[in-house]
Image (cartoon, helix red, strand yellow):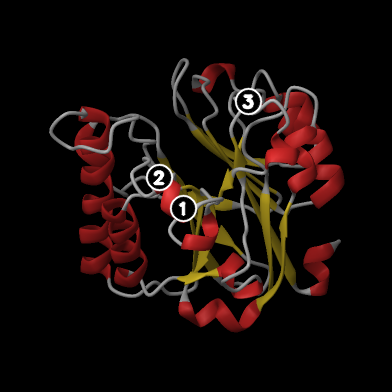
């Protein structure tokens, strides 16, 4: 098993309905073989989550936080963990956008792991005109304040659909998307403040430094997503500074965008040597 070799593979994927796409979980596991799989936008109440499918794929340890039709996060793991029940309910909405666990590692230590699904923010980048955009900014502000109060992250990992493409090279056209929700300056500044508050390291950009283009999401609206390649990097993996030296490998699994009835996001995996 990979864990016996001292590695840990963590993948994140906005699955865009876990019941609709549960069959693709087997394809993901075949291709990437993650030890821990973090899902977002599961759109599924807890009692209807496909537990049997996850169990059959070897994920004996699971935590789900879902609701009917919207949002939802889940963590599937080969390693035992403890759910962090005391983490905040962001904006007091109970809308199933965050799940934290303390993962038990083979060396006897733990890894603090957070799975986030940040609000998309709607279509209008104006706090006053668009309540969804205001919620997104408030959500980010609360997390940043919480992170600042805790200080720099230690032996920790944060993954998920953060719904922001922060760098110019994280979008197909920086100039054309400056006013488009997910790449506006106010969102980029908010994400940067969160990252800096925890001294988080952008694990994927560790392997693929700017100015190389890199995307994890392509709109369903494109007739030929691969030909147009108008993507954005919305899905992220961050590690605490003390784990930066343990980064070994990453995969942005672009072929997943062409899976039959696939999500508009692709899985992202990072491997650590622990």
Q: Report the residue at 65% width, 70% height from top.
A: 208
Rounded to the nearest angstrom, the CA distance separating label 1 from label 3 is 24 Å
Please state the horizontal and vertical placement of residue 132, each as a whole percent of the image. 27, 30
Bin the neighbour count of mark 2 within 10 Å (Cα to Cα): few under 14, some 14-19, many 20 and up. Answer: many
In terms of depth relative to the viewer, which is nearer, 188 or 56? 188
Please state the horizontal and vertical placement of residue 63, each as a whole percent of the image. 54, 38
Q: Are marks 1 and 2 in contact (CB under 8 Å)?
A: yes
Q: Report the residue at 74% width, 40% height from top.
A: 226
Please state the horizontal and vertical placement of residue 227, each as a whole percent of the image. 75, 39
Point out the tag, 1 or 2, that comes first from the N-terminus: 1
Helix, strand, or loop for circle 2? loop
Please state the horizontal and vertical placement of residue 194, each as a whole percent of the image. 32, 62
Rounded to the nearest angstrom, the CA distance separating label 1 from label 2 is 6 Å
Figure check: 102 above or below 76: below
In terms of depth relative to the viewer, which is nearer, 215 or 108? 215
Q: Which residue is mark 3?
A: 18
Q: Report the residue at 39% width, 32% height from top.
A: 96
Q: Which mark is residue 73?
A: none
251 sits to left or right of 46: right
Q: Is residue 176 visible?
A: yes
Q: Which residue is mark 2?
A: 182
Rounded to the nearest angstrom, the CA distance separating label 2 from label 3 is 24 Å
In which image quadrant can residue 143 be found?
bottom left
Q: Report the residue at 46% width, 62% height from top.
A: 167
Point out the tag, 2 or 3, that comes first from the N-terminus: 3
Q: Tell which tag, 2 or 3, sits nearer the viewer.
A: 2
Q: Are marks 2 and 3 in contact (CB under 8 Å)?
A: no
Bin the neighbour count of mark 1 within 10 Å (Cα to Cα): few under 14, some 14-19, many 20 and up. Answer: many
Q: Which mark is residue 165?
A: 1
Q: Tell which tag, 1 or 3, sits nearer the viewer.
A: 1
In which image quadrant can residue 269 be found?
bottom right
């Amino acid at each position: 098993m990979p864990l016996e070799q001292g590695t840990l593979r963590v993948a994140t994927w906005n699955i865009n309905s876990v019941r609709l796409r549960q069959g693709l979980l087997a394809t993901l596991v075949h291709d990437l073989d993650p030890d821990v799989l973090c899902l977002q936008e599961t759109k599924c109440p807890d009692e209807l989550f496909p537990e049997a499918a996850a169990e059959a794929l070897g994920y004996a340890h699971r935590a789900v936080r879902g609701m009917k039709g919207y949002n939802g996060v889940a963590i599937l793991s080969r390693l035992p963990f403890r759910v962090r029940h005391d983490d905040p309910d962001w904006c007091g909405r109970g809308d199933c956008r965050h799940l934290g666990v303390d993962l038990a590692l083979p060396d006897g230590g733990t890894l603090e792991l957070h799975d986030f699904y940040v609000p998309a923010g709607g279509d209008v980048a104006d706090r006053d005109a668009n309540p969804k955009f205001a919620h997104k900014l408030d959500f980010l502000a609360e997390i940043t304040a919480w992170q600042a109060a805790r200080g720099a992250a230690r032996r920790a990992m944060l993954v998920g659909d953060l719904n922001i493409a922060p760098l110019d090279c994280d979008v197909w056209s920086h100039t054309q998307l400056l006013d488009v929700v997910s790449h506006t300056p106010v969102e980029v500044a908010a994400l940067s403040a969160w990252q800096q508050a925890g001294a988080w390291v952008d694990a994927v950009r560790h392997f693929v430094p700017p100015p190389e283009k890199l995307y994890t999401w392509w709109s369903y609206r494109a007739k030929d997503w691969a030909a147009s390649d108008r993507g954005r990097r919305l899905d992220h993996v961050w590690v605490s500074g003390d784990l930066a030296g343990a980064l070994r490998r990453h995969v942005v699994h672009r072929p997943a965008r062409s899976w039959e009835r696939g999500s508009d996001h692709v899985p992202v995996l990072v491997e650590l040597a622990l």
